[in-house]
Image (cartoon, rainbow, N blue to C red):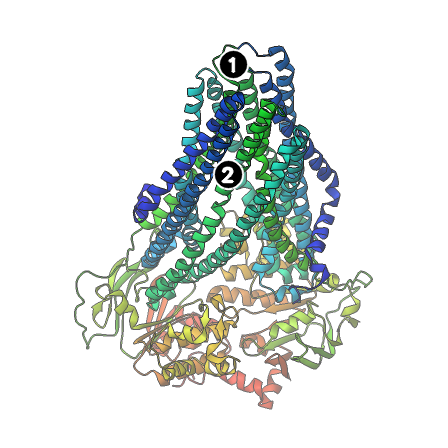
Amino acid sequence: MWKLARYLKHFKKEVILGPFFKLLEAIFELIVPLVMAKIIDVGVKNGDTRYVLTMGGVMVLLGVAGLGFALTCQYFAAKASQGFGTMVRNDLFAHISSLSHGEVDRIGTPSLITRITGDVNQLQVAVAMLIRLVVRAPFLVIGAAVMAMMLDLRLSLVFLAAAPLVGLALYFVMSRSVPFYRVIQKKLDRISLITRENLEGARVIRAFSKQDTERARFHAASEDAMVSSIRVGKIAALLNPLTFAIMNLAIVAIVWFGGFRVDTGALSQGQIIAFVNYMTQILLALVVVANLVIIFTKSSASAARVNEVFATQPSITDPEKALSTKDAAAPKIQFRDVSFSYPGSGEVSLSHISVDIQKGQTVGIIGGTGSGKSTLVNLIPRFYDATEGSILVDGVDVRSYPLEKLRGQIGIVPQQAVLFSGTLEENLRWGKEGATKEQMDKALRVAQAKEFVDRLPDGWDTQIAQGGKNLSGGQRQRLTIARALTREPDILILDDSMSALDFATDAALRRALREETEDMTVLMVTQRAHTIRSADLIIVLDDGEVAGIGTHEALFAQCGVYREICLSQQKEKEAAGQ
Amino acid sequence: MSLSKKSGKENSSWAVGKRLLSFTKPYAGFLAGGLLCALVSVLLSLWLPVLIGDAVDLIVGAGQVDFPGMVPILLKMAGAIAVSALFSWMMTVCTNTVSYKTVKSIRDAAFDRLSQVPLSVLDSHSHGDLIARVVTDTDMISDGLLQGFSQLFTGLVTILGTLGFMLSVNAHIALVVVVLTPLSLFVASFIARRSHRMFSVQSATRGEMTGLVEELIGNQKVVKAFGYEKKAQARFEEINGRLYDCGVKAQFYSSMTNPCTRFVNGVVYAAVGIFGALSVIGGNLSVGQLSSFLAYANQYTKPFNEITGVITELQTAFASARRVFSLLDEPLEPSDAGNQPIAHCDGSVALEHVFFSYRPDRPLIEDLNLRVQPGQIIAIVGPTGCGKTTMINLLMRFYDVDSGKILVDGQDTRTLQRSSLRSQYGMVLQDSWLFGGTVAENIAYGRPDATREEIVAAAKAAHAHSFIRRLPKGYDTLIEGDGANLSQGQRQLMCIARVMLTQPPMLILDEATSSIDTRTEEKIQEAFARMMRGRTSFIVAHRLSTIRQADVILVMRDGHIVEMGSHAALLEKGGFYATLYNSQFAQPDAQA
């Protein structure tokens, strides 16, 4: 938690002055009962109207000053805590951006999102509370106790008895109810889950006429959540009555024992009233202290989660030494005895892959699920680094390129067709910030997207919803291809990214790629044998190993795995011929 | 479609409130009990300052303390404290019970409605939004409305009770407090309004930021591939900057509440102190009475703040209630209670002059006629997004035809019970749906009474047995949320097993386009073939082998059926199907 305190350095003024002003307010607040006691003991006893009015005026002035101090403190607290949160978020976002996929996969995207939003919020609350209450509440407790002790040491023993009781009540209720809230959250999650299942499976459920069963399932889940909520509610509801009772019984004790003290002349009537006042203040402040403890416990967990992200170092970084010169004669891409296993998994995803890909070639990569096709192409832009061996682009190890330069020459079309919120044109410009209209137009044409884009009422200005949900799967895929083409990359990687296209579009797209992008080296990962039949080179992967490399004809003749794939997909055709 | 805002009377806060209250009716006993408890608890707690005052009056000075007189007063206090605490606990228990039970009824009603509305409602709304209505919005109602009720009530009782007690002690000083009341009201509503406005700006900005983070971190691969990191950071910092601005304001305004309350309290306290002291000097008030007045002054402002807080919460709750109610107001699927269950089904299907469209301005299916003999295979083909699922929607009566009719075994489907019609079809869709239960439960979904032997037999027939056996707990393996622990192909095999178990006379199948590896794909093909034997089958087809064995091919394009006939006849015709066939399967670039 203290590691994050460095961000507070930027808010020294607020962090120091805020509590100071709060302290002033608290002091004023403590003086008020004294003034009141004076009014009663001096003003009333002597029938001095002037004195009463003067002291009354002092009380109002104390109130006004207190308000001023308090607002100043609140403002400082708001500024410092929000500023703190804003800076942490900016740094956190930048740090997450710098992480490589291995790290992001390990922590998980949803978890990263809650850390940058929920956890930072929690810390913000803690900072604000720190400034506003950390001085005030203990000060009020101690201050009121000291004041009371100064008035009468023996009577203040009542405080010493009541305070631990309040603490005990708090502990009792919290320790019994807090774990329950987690249970209830799980039950609510189940309600969401069933609802989601029912929406997604609406057709199947209705096809089997299972609506009644599903309803019963839902009712049981919601009953379950209700019963738990009511049960924990009964415990949590004890808190207020318990503190109320302890507080007021303490007052009863003060009045009773105070009576003896007054009887012996050790205390005055007005001082008893002041005592009652301090009692109330102390116990209210104790409740605040308890809340502070809860807030800090929660936020220290948040701080740990945030710090964990900061402590994670990106495994893939820019090289320290300068990039060696390109070798024009070298193959465009070279895999040299490359092996790879995902961090944390013992399984080998790729083993000993060696292949040369020449400039301008179209290369097909085929194999079953989990054979390592996507993994192989992910190594080229260094989404992951090879565990063994090396990958060379233009004769230079990919690890020697500055990342920006390496990735700048690669156009990638990911498996999942992801678009971003913004206009269609903005999405294309992801490929290249300064792309001309002509470049984008050509990209759309090659990607077979021009026709449907032109038909959109707003054309290039069409607003894309988050994730591109307002387009069909095929349209999305074609736009992600156009996005990659806009960059006019040296290397184009299509990671099974034509799956949502019908065969006619698929064929037209491949023809356009072939005709329009002569110098581009194209890598096509696919499940469909016919998509890559005419590729210059086909890499057949089986369980992370190369089962064959060559042209369709050669592979069909020699490679069993490849032949099996072709035959299963083209049973009634003479797959080898034509 | 219509889950949007409705204008007019039925949407006024009054109407929404009344409707919410109607949900609490079964728990009226708890509600009344809660109110009664609140009344007892608050009045007793208000009595305490009076008792303290009485006691203080008996402690005049040295040697002037009336101990015997104090004993009954202090006993009364102890009793009042105990009873008030008990009733305050009972009040919370009652309102909790009402609130959670009401929310359960509303939630159940919302879910029930979802399972009874026409599918078009589910198709035309984001699922996230519907889930939010069932889960989050109902929670808001419980938090805001019903918890609010108890606070509102205790607040009012406190204010009125305080005033009453003060009046009973001394009318003049009570008047001082009443005169200062508008100050509390003004301050409380000023702060509530400001902070409410700022909070909504803040939460909108926060939502915007979460959206951006989700998008950019969730798709980090793309962000990195395109070197978008710097721009992403800039976009993030821009939103973050705005969040800072409104965050400071929201936090500042809302944190004004406590100091301002303390200030108003201080003013009231001082005023009561001055006037009270003067009255004591004038002999109209005892010191003890002054002390109880001071105690009242200290707690007088608090309920005003609470009530303004409750009003803000009520607004939120009403907004949520409106969203839930508009779901509850969705019309149901027309009832088919009077319809016949299907008596017999030979598997023949006929479509006569069928017209259908999702939107009146975009006609889709026009005058479709089709006669399917028992056991025939109908392939539906066409490019991506041509509306092949429309046929499934009509056959299953997920949607009803606009005119014309669909006959099964000679009976108009609209005269049949939906459930009995649907049970005649076995349906396997591309996005195979599994629910969170065991593998066996998922397979037995259509026949919960099936024995383990039957389940295993069905799984074997669907070629699913071998992979299920290899799962950690075999048939008792728990499917995690949406079957994420199975591959897409495996999930589809399980769905086939599910249909195998029910043995329906007719089938609706949706072939997967991709993402299934070759070997699994082959198994699915075999399973499909086995299942289709002797059954009337409608297949949304992508594979040539399937299409060629079909008796009738329906060729769809842009939602219309453009051609219909056998493979040979359609090729002969040289129309759209022929073009499609040539581009898909004849490998024009294979020679290149």
Whether residue A311 sits left or right of residue A191 in the image: it is: left
From the viewer's perspective, is residue A389 above or below residue B575? above
| Residue A165 in view in this figure | no
From the viewer's perspective, is residue A103 above or below residue B413? above
Q: Position of residue A557 (x, y in %)?
A: 37, 75
Q: Position of residue A290 (x, y in %)?
A: 47, 33
- Residue neighbourhood size for the residue with mark 1, other residues' Cα within 10 Å, grouped as few (<14), some (14–19), many (≥20): many
From the viewer's perspective, is residue A67 above or below residue B415? above
Kindly give the residue lying farthest to the right in the view shown: B338
Kindly give the residue lying farthest to the bottom in the view shown: B573
**Disc 2 target residue:** B262
> How far is mark 2 from mark 1, CA to CA?
31 Å
Whether residue B570 sits left or right of residue A296 in the image: it is: right
Front in this rendered view, residue B538 or B313: B313
From the viewer's perspective, is residue B554 above or below residue A46? below
Q: Amino acid at mark 1?
A: Val
Whether residue A510 sits left or right of residue A236 in the image: it is: left
Q: Position of residue A95 (x, y in %)?
A: 32, 55
- For mark 2, name the chain: B
Front in this rendered view, residue B191 or A492: B191
- Which SS class for mark 2? helix
How many numbered circles are shown? 2
- Residue neighbourhood size for the residue with mark 2, other residues' Cα within 10 Å, grouped as few (<14), some (14–19), many (≥20): many
- For mark 1, name the chain: A
Contact, mark 2 vs mark 1 (Cβ under 8 Å): no
